[in-house]
Image (cartoon, rainbow, N blue to C red):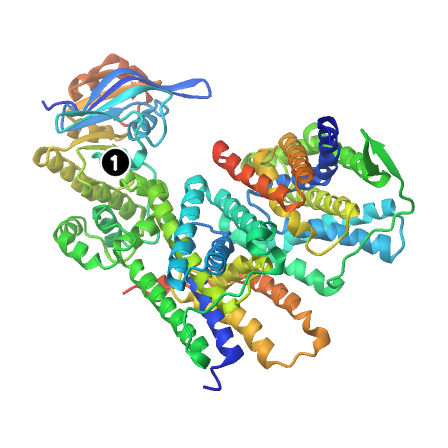
Amino acid sequence: MTLSTFLSSTLVLGLLEAAPLVLAAIGFTLIYRLNGFTNVAYAENITLGAYFAVIFNSLLGWNFYASIIPAALLSGLLSVVTYLVIFRPSFRRGVGKTELIILSVGVSYFIRYGSRILFGNDLFNFNFSSTSYLKVFGIGVTNIQLICIGLVAVISIGIYFFIYKTNYGEKMRALADNEELAMISGINPTKVSLLIWFIAGSSAGLAGLFYGSFSFVSSSLGWNMILIVIMVSVVGGVGSIRGALVASAFVGIVTSAVNLLSSNSLYGDIVLLIIFIGILKVRKVRV
Amino acid sequence: MRTKALHLQNVVKKYGGRTVVNVPDITFGTHGIEGLIGPNGAGKTTLINLISHKVGMTQGQILYYKDEKEIDISNKSFDEISRLGLVRSNQIIQDFESLSIRESMLLSLATPKYEKFYNIFCDKELRKSTEQEIERYLDYFHFDNPDGHALSAGEKKLLDIIRCMLLKPNFLLMDEPTAGLPQDQTDKVVELMRRKTTEEGMSILIVEHDLDLIWKVSENVFFMAEGEILIQGVPDEVRKNQTVINKYMGEGSNA
Amino acid sequence: MGLLSGYVIYSLSFLLIYIALATILHLQFSITGIVNFGLVGFWGLGMYLFALLQTKLALPFLPALILACALVGMTALLLGRVILNLDGQAILVGTLAFATIIEYLTTTEKWATNGVMGLGTIKMPFDFGRSTDQVFFLLILLCLVLLILYTAKLKTSPYGRLLLSIKDNEVLAQSLGKPTFRHKIIFFTFTCILIGFFGALSAPLYNYIFPRMIGPGVTFTIWIALMLGGRTRLLGGMIGIVATVGLFDYFIETVVPIPTQYAEMVPNFKFALYGLMLILILMFRPLGILGDKKKEGVK
């Protein structure tokens, strides 16, 4: 392998890898910024997004692209339900920050194994009507992967503009920054919180769906992603969407570089986790 | 007049470009009890935080004198400074919710010798050797239930002061020590401060808004405004100073 | 000895090890305030190091045990120095990442661990014929009793108060001259060595060890048990483990007859129920089954 093919493979495969991660990190970061805790149950939102798409695509026979829309809506709904039934009452009861994280682990277990009871331990694949192979910088990719990247880009930019450039996004950010101030300026905190949890859930679901479309869907899909998602959000600066974007691209490129150099894909994760622990220290970030 | 305890040189603290404290050259601890006064936002608490290193300085040097030795504490950590005998009490009520009043006092009295993870059988010894000292404070301040938790804000405030006193500091920084205390307890705290400074050679710097207390107990008063120490002198001079009257007592509340 | 033989004694030995881990988590989280989500990493590290020293270097039991614990301690010291002066959520993420790294390494480093094929066979430290398992059980029981006695005594010792003060208000403890970061590192290292120690003791019980044994499920099961039993109480971990692992892994699996076609669904129900219990406990009874001692009145 020459250096130039190594670099271009790393770049192309890295960005493919990073695409769903960007979406997942944006959603995670939104919830973190609003409520200030690491929501581990977010992992299951990612998984269920993929499962919802599987239901429409494989079981009901919908077109893959058509099933994206109900999957995104249902994931957003699931997120809102967990917020209303579990997290909001817990905030009101004054459950501490660490306890909230442990609580979210409980939610995660409940949803993951609950869905395993429903869906079984099987792996699912999506049905694509036509798959063709293309070459980008000499690297073989499928048209599905390219379309997914395009969609991720469109959706991320959409969320970015919604949050930073629209009136409603302004309100959301105000609430995230200072609840009291937001109340005084006439923002309805309940409505805005619901919207944030909905958007976060949808982007998690979309992340899971795209991730699953690259390989397969299983009940541990989200769980396998969540640690990297948390790390990406932490390193990118929690609450910063641009940071999440850069960090995701970094993760994708590092992973694919390590994977090209070694036979075992776990090395990519090991290297990443070590780098992340190091960054945690250097930046002394408040997670 | 005693020898100085603290010497601050070019101490500056900036928050986002705004200078909140700027002290070119000042000496503390030449009297038993000194007072630091000034309007809200003058930077008094920030100055205390800088000396005790609860927050870091932007620039400057702080020298600390103990047993005729000069120690540069500019780069020492918060806990290290406390171990050197430069201790602070807190303006905002602080407590350990898992510890009873007595346990909290024992924590203060436990030296590193007792605090080893393998040394779990030394509690009796510590309690025995400190019993008299603890009882003296408990008799003096009358807590309702010394083996329960500090309940009221007043009890917590007193406990905070007692914890500091038990460390037997050379120099004690007290940030609004009597705020929120009833008059009889305030009198006891003042009496305790006087005794410590005259009998045990402790130096105390108090930050207070209760000016009557300041005029009554301090031997030397510093007036701070807009981050700078403008005036220092004996209480009678400072209270008559035109700048102090204009910048502070003009607010008219306490004077 | 019919009752205490074979599978029963094996199950009880593991129950004791889980109780020990929950008690150590109580030391780390409830007394010191360190949120260790990488518990299984230290446990697995102790287990694998011990197994490697015994099988590859042919060390006898005791030297292998001591060396394994020392290496776990060094790892904990290093990790502690990096993350323990960060805030709780960073410690949580850092320890979780650490455990994940250990799990992955046992899979990738086939030259040492045989990867997913498993590492073995790990021998018992002694041979008493048919009662070897019972004697080993008694050894674990002894270690657990010592651990619980230590924990009980620590709570009323000056060091215990120091740790509680760090958990409650670290800055205030520093203002009293306590070097809190140093003590957190020391105590974290010490307790992680204990975790590694019980990991090493688990190796001969398993006989053969695999990477999937040290997945995050172990950590979370122990967290759930501690929360369920009562995190502020000495015996909270024990009660929690009996109510979760004891009930599901041993009682239901050994006593309740489950048709084979449903057997593979049992773990799913188990973990879903663990999750539900954790949610209900944290929302409605945050201090667990045993509750708070304070409200019963302190001596």
Q: Residue at x 64, y 35 (%)?
A: A254
Q: Is residue C103 visible?
A: no
Q: Is residue A54 above or below residue B24?
A: below
Q: Nearer the viewer, residue C47 or C154?
A: C47
Q: Residue at x 27, y 48 (%)?
A: B155
Quarter of the image where the C terminus of chain B is located: top left
Q: Position of residue A53 (x, y in %)?
A: 80, 51
Quarter of the image where the N terminus of chain B is located: top left
Q: Position of residue A267 (x, y in %)?
A: 62, 43
Q: Residue at x 58, y 36 (%)?
A: A238
State the residue position of label 1.
B82
Q: How many marks?
A: 1
* Chain of the residue on which disc 1 is drawn: B
Q: Element at badge 1? A: helix
Q: Nearer the viewer, residue B140 or A17?
A: A17
Q: Position of residue C258 (x, y in %)?
A: 66, 78
Task: Mark 1: give few (<14), some (14-19) or many (20+) Cα within 10 Å.
Answer: many
Amino acid tagged 1: Ser
